[in-house]
């Protein structure tokens, strides 16, 4: 795999991890679990833009990675958006 492909995959993973933290699915580096759905929405938009701008210039493997991560983030975003705030606060305190 080329160096630029590896770097692109690393960037995609960084966006994904950051969005999962914003969804409250994983803890941030300080160990805190919190939600920031506006940030997650922006991150999904950034990833979609990056996918569009790189179309035709990425391998099938990277395209599948992009598609899978974007699908996972969109589904989790919709799920979290539909949850009542008080339930989320109780779960993040556990």
Image (cartoon, rainbow, N blue to C red):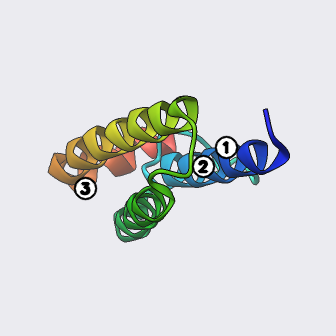
Residue 23 in percent (x, y) is at 42, 50
92 vs 41, left or right, is right
Secondary structure under the numbered disc 1 in the rendered image: helix
Secondary structure under the numbered disc 2 in the rendered image: helix
Q: Residues within 10 Å of mark 1 (few under 14, many from 20)?
A: some
Check contact, mark 3 vs mark 1: CB within 8 A. no
- Placement of 93 over or under 52, stated as above or below: above
The residue mark sitting in front, 3 or 1, is 1
Going from N to C along the chain, the mark reached first, 2 or 3, is: 2
Q: CA distance from mark 3 to mark 1?
A: 33 Å
Residue placed at 46% from the left, 31% from the top?
A: 64
22 vs 27, left or right, is left
25 vs 77, left or right, is right
Q: Which residue is mark 1?
A: 9
Residue in front for this viewpoint, 70 or 53: 53
Q: CA distance from mark 1 to mark 2?
A: 5 Å
Residue placed at 38% from the left, 59% from the top?
A: 48
Q: Which residue is mark 2?
A: 12
Residue placed at 27% from the left, 47% from the top?
A: 80
Q: Which residue is mark 3?
A: 85
Residue 41 in percent (x, y) is at 34, 64
Q: In the image as oriented, which residue stretches furthest toward the front?
A: 56
- Placement of 7 over or under 50, stated as above or below: above
Going from N to C along the chain, the mark reached first, 3 or 1, is: 1
Q: CA distance from mark 2 to mark 3?
A: 29 Å
Q: In the image as oriented, which residue stretches furthest toward the right?
A: 3
């Amino acid at each position: 795999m080329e160096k630029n492909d590896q770097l692109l995959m690393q960037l995609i993973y960084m966006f994904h991890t950051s969005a999962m933290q914003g969804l409250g699915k994983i803890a941030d580096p300080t160990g805190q679990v919190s939600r920031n759905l506006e940030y997650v929405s922006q991150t999904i938009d950034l990833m979609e833009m990056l996918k569009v701008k790189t179309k035709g210039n990425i391998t099938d493997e990277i395209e599948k990675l992009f598609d899978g991560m974007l699908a996972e983030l969109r589904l989790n975003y919709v799920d979290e958006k539909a949850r009542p705030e008080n339930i989320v606060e109780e779960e993040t305190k556990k």
